Amino acid sequence: MNLQPTYQKIFGQKEFLRNNVGTEYKTGGATLDASAFTGVAENGYVKAGTAIYLGGDGLYLPWADAGEGETREGAGLTTHDVKLVEGSNPVVGVLVAGHPLEHKCTGVTEGFKEEVKGYLRFDA
């Protein structure tokens, strides 16, 4: 296990919220399963506003609608851009309530909107 901190500067993050009214965040953030995000990453970054959920092993995965008999827990949106670094799983903040702009988010499906209904209110 590598305990040496790595610092990354991120420039130009795009805002994905309509406003800050009623925003709530998951305490302690979320550890992403970096290997699962290679398909949704842009230029090596998982973008702010990416839909995620808690996987069975305690790591967060990119949103995929649940199949028959499956459940999804811990659904939310990443709050900031995070770089994927080989050999490590990044920690990111998670928005669990607020007013995101759907067209500025990644991976939001009808199933995701149903899962977070009443917490995340998507605006056009």
Image: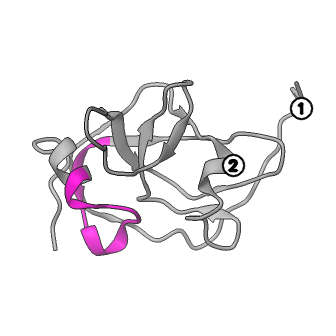
* Range shown magenta: 96-111
Q: Is residue 13 left or right of residue 73?
A: right
| Identity of the residue drawn at 30% across and 44% down | 67
The image position of residue 34, as x and y in percent, is 67, 47
- Of the residues shown, which amino acid type is indicated by label 2? Ser
Q: Is residue 116 among the parts visible in the rendering? A: no
The image position of residue 85, as x and y in percent, is 79, 52
Residue at label 2? 35
Q: Is residue 85 left or right of residue 94?
A: right
Q: Image quadrant for the N terminus?
A: top right
| Identity of the residue drawn at 76% across and 54% down | 8
Q: Is residue 117 among the parts visible in the rendering? A: yes
Residue count near mark 2 (Cα–Cα under 10 Å), binned few <14, some 14–19, many ≥20: some
**Label 1, label 2: how far apart the Cα atoms are:** 20 Å
Position of residue 25 relative to residue 1, above or below, is below
Label 1 or label 2, whichever lies nearer to me, is 2
Residue at label 1? 4
Tell me where residue 90 sits by quadrant: top right
| Label 1 element class | loop
Position of residue 9 relative to residue 3, above or below, is below
- Of the residues shown, which amino acid type is indicated by label 1? Gln
| Label 2 element class | helix
The image position of residue 20, as x and y in percent, is 25, 52
- Whether the magenta-drawn stretch holds residue 41 is answered as no
| Identity of the residue drawn at 49% across and 41% down | 93
Q: Earlier in the sequence, mark 1 or mark 2?
A: 1
Q: Is residue 23 left or right of residue 88?
A: left
